[in-house]
Image (tube, grey):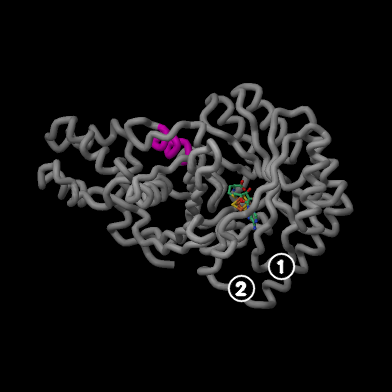
Amino acid sequence: MTTIDADALRPGLSGLKPDQLTAWVEARGEPAYRARQVADAIWKDGGLTSAVAIRTLPAALREALDAGFRFDTVSDTDVREADGGLTEKFLHRLDDGALIESVLMHYPARGSGRERHTLCISSQAGCAVGCPFCATGELGFGRDLEVAEIVDQVRFSARRLAADGRRLTNIVFMGMGEPLLNLDRVLDTIQALNDPRRFGLGARHITVSTSGVVPGIRRLTALGPQFTLAVSLHAARDSLRDVLVPLNRRWPVAEVVDAARDHTRATGRRISYEATMIGGINDTPEDAEAMAELLRGDHAHVNLIPMNPVAHTPWAASPMPVIERFAATLRAAGVSTTIRRNRGQEVGAACGQLAAERAGEPAPPVVARRRARLVAESAAALHGERSHEPVPVGVGD
Ligand code: SAH
Ligand code: SF4
């Protein structure tokens, strides 16, 4: 682990709220309109990466900005392309050496639909929830990201797009980490992304995905409609969900779906549920029936996504005909369902995969033990046995 140097301790500039920026400018004896000029330099077309480039500012203020703040917290970025350039995967090295990812997906215009550019961002380095099919879950928890570290992932892609006169159209919190376990920072980030004086993206174009942190969902409901909420369901039966989403041992599936229903009732916004389809594990006819029963009559939408292969698991994606049958069962119960193709598989676009590769392969005996444990746990779960494993550390306290 790299030690944090003095530079890294300077706050990220893009994490400042407008009133904080104004107060900082005024404390230096400069008029408030200078704050607007700085804000333009941060936000316009993804913004600049150094205060030196802001020609409109007096030199002393430029120097004070560079001395007081980091202009870009994700400057050290490795870029990989997939799908013939339709997917771009970014591995950002943060100032303390932590690695996080963002993924930019381009969707060309089709029919009357305009072209879209969707960015998937990370909210934490690693994740405490530990879903076994997820590469980030394998890494374990590193730390929460600062607001600037989340925002700067967005600025990085916005800058790339602006070079060709394009703009981000959608942002999804589906990268590394559990956004509802870093909720204060995620909410501040969304405010920045939403604010017309900052990034200016409509709330409907922002989606936050959660593995089912019930108190977080309830807090969002109390705030009113903010953005689209997606819930990673994966299984409707507690025994299986205990294994696939270990925080289910803290907040069982019925509580998660209750919280989601209340959210829809209070905000009028449809919830979308995600299910990663894992061959022979959560794709059986019984699981399809259980999910159909659970969601019957709800104002909800289900996305079925074939699992991306991840090292250290004995599992693979469900075959497409099995996913189609699963979808048919849900639709027969009136639950609207879409099958999604996973983008960018060849560069490891599944949640956290590139950073996991960089972290290095565990020793073969460790992998073998993990696989054996998963086989045993999922076999017990398929027989309806609840997990005896503890709730993951850092979840639900
Ligand atoms: N922690 C949040 C958001 C980040 S994960 C959550 O779990 O919802 C974003 C999505 O990627 C989740 O729906 C997760 O289930 C999915 N995902 C993780 N690993 C995957 C894999 N190997 N294949 C397909 N989807 C995966
Ligand atoms: Fe964490 Fe989401 Fe991955 Fe589960 S799927 S380990 S909650 S990032």
Decide: is 318 above or below 301.
Answer: below
By secondary structure, the bulk of the magenta-drawn segment is best described as helix
* Residue drawn at 19 percent across, 50 percent down: 53
Decide: is 189 above or below 32.
Answer: below
Give the image location of residue 82, x and y in percent: 52, 62
Q: Quadrant of residue 362?
A: bottom right
* Residue drawn at 48 percent across, 54 percent down: 102
Does the magenta portion include 187?
yes
User: Is residue 66 rendered to the left or right of residue 279?
Assistant: left
Provide the residue designation for mark 1. 370
Q: Secondary structure at mark 2?
A: loop
Q: Nearer the viewer, residue 296 or 389?
A: 296
**Mark 1 and mark 2: span between their CA atoms?**
10 Å
Q: Nearer the viewer, residue 156 or 357?
A: 156
Give the image location of residue 55, x and y in percent: 14, 45
Provide the residue designation for mark 2. 362
Decide: is 355 above or below 181.
Answer: below
* Residue drawn at 29 percent across, 41 percent down: 44
User: Residue placed farthest to the bottom in the image?
Assistant: 364
Give the image location of residue 303, x and y in percent: 68, 43
Are the two marked residues, 1 and 2, in contact with CB atoms closer than 8 angstroms?
yes
Q: Check mark 1 vs ligand 2: CB closer than 8 Å? yes or no.
A: no
Does the magenta portion include 333?
no
User: Is residue 319 rendered to the left or right of residue 311?
Assistant: right
Q: Which residues fall within the magenta stretch?
A: 186-194
Decide: few, some or many residues near mark 2? Use Cα within 10 Å; few <14, some 14-19, many ≥20. Answer: few
The amino acid type of the residue labelled 1 equals Arg
* Residue drawn at 73 percent across, 53 percent down: 277
